[in-house]
Amino acid sequence: MCLVLWMGSTIVKCSNSTVIRCLGGEGNFSIFKRKNLLSRFIWALKAVVKLTYMLTGYSVKINTKDLIYLCGVNQDRLLQSLDLKSYGISDEHDVIKQPRSIYKKNKWPFVSIDLHCYWMLVFLCLVYVVTGNNRYIAAFLIRYYKGVSYFLNATVSDIERLICLNDQPFEAAALTLWAREQGKNTIVLQHGVILSYNYYYPSNSKEFWAWGENGRLHFKTRVKGGKYVVKGRFLKKEYDIPGYFILPDRETMNGVVCPSFSASEIVGLIKLVGSIEKGKGKRLFSLKLHPSTKFKFVFRLIGFFYGLNWINYKTPILEVAKKYDFLVTKNSSTAVDFLLLGKPVFGIETPPLHEKIFNNSFFSEDDMKKLIHSGHLFNVEEVNDSRISFIRGCTNKL
């Protein structure tokens, strides 16, 4: 590991092994387990893109108590919908973020590295792709952490709390590790339904602020004394939660398809709903893609071909849930808003874990076909009881 020792003299409080452990795993997926050339290349390409973004960052001294870190436009959009006061986050907070594009001017400062550090990290990515030797990934993580520490020491050393919506990616883990080593409190806000425990845990922050009790059973942390804290789910625009399903009128019903960003899942759901007889030439379904979906225009064309209307992916999901009568999905956390509003959710090939998390509060594909053809839903009371149980466990509401 002489290469690691040569790469910089920035003094940091934590050991190299701590850096590797915290930055080297995103959920249960370790970046050290990438065996084939293609997976190494994809990881390295994404890392270089992130590093290139960071070259355009700039330093602004931040003196507020609370600092919120955002990574990506989806987190930016989610933050704007949250009622931060209800979480106990001061109005005097600051935000630091990673940009969506290096060509767009950002309203907030974001984490930066110097040019020398940039080229060193790019070199390590290249060598890792070619050789497949994990020592270069270890060297990358250590050098990255040291490079980011320059920026953090100069800009945010006076904060008391670092808050993020996802502390799993290596760039977010670097910030939380630095803050912990500086004696700051670190908090991660639950940003969606925990559909897979592989992505949320182990947490890198001192506190995981959860919507409800459902995630506690699988909670894991890399931090000694890390806590699972139930805070609830607070939105700026709250709404009444009905005690029973609001069943749609067969003549006027409109459904929305919300897949994850998986291409095969998107195409599968489009084909499924597109094959259902709608009658009278009416377009029954609309398609809303996940903001992280690539090549959205392609799926829009496919959806149009199968008779689906288009919903702008930037439309807040709460607005969608209020406008449409039911949801068709496989594993999207958009189901939460529909269930809260008493709108039926039809789960298509829902993974067993997801069905367990949602506590059997989905209707089936057959139920959807019956609703469309006959206007009736069956086992409504049983599913509604499951829905109420899910809401209580997921959001501590009702």
Image (spheres, rainbow, N blue to C red):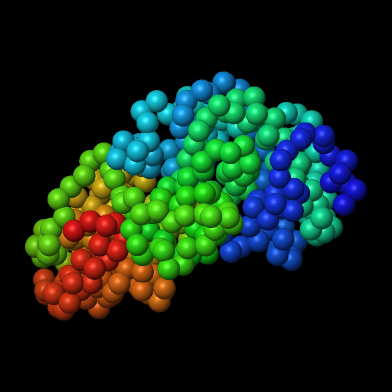
Q: Residue lying farthest right?
A: 2
**Quadrant of res 236:** top left
Q: How many labels does the image show?
A: 0
Q: In which quarter of the image is the C terminus?
A: bottom left
Q: Which of 58 and 289 is in front in this view?
A: 58
Q: Nearer the viewer, residue 293 or 5?
A: 5
Residue 361: tell me if it is visible.
yes
| Residue 337 sits above or below residue 97 on the image | below
| Residue 210 sits above or below residue 372 on the image | above
Drawn side of residue 43 relative to residue 7, left or right: left
Image position, residue 20 (x, y; %): 71, 53
Residue 330: tell me if it is visible.
no
Q: Residue at x 64, y 52 (%)?
A: 22
Drawn side of residue 239 relative to residue 146, left or right: left
| Residue 282 sits above or below residue 347 on the image | above
Image position, residue 385 (x, y; %): 18, 72
Q: Nearer the viewer, residue 279 or 38?
A: 38
Image position, residue 205 (x, y; %): 53, 49
Q: Residue at x 58, y 64 (%)?
A: 28
Q: Which residue is drawn at 45% across and 52% down?
A: 208
**Quadrant of res 374:** bottom left
Image position, residue 302 (x, y; %): 40, 57
| Residue 149 sits above or below residue 253 on the image | above
Q: Residue at x 40, y 76 (%)?
A: 352
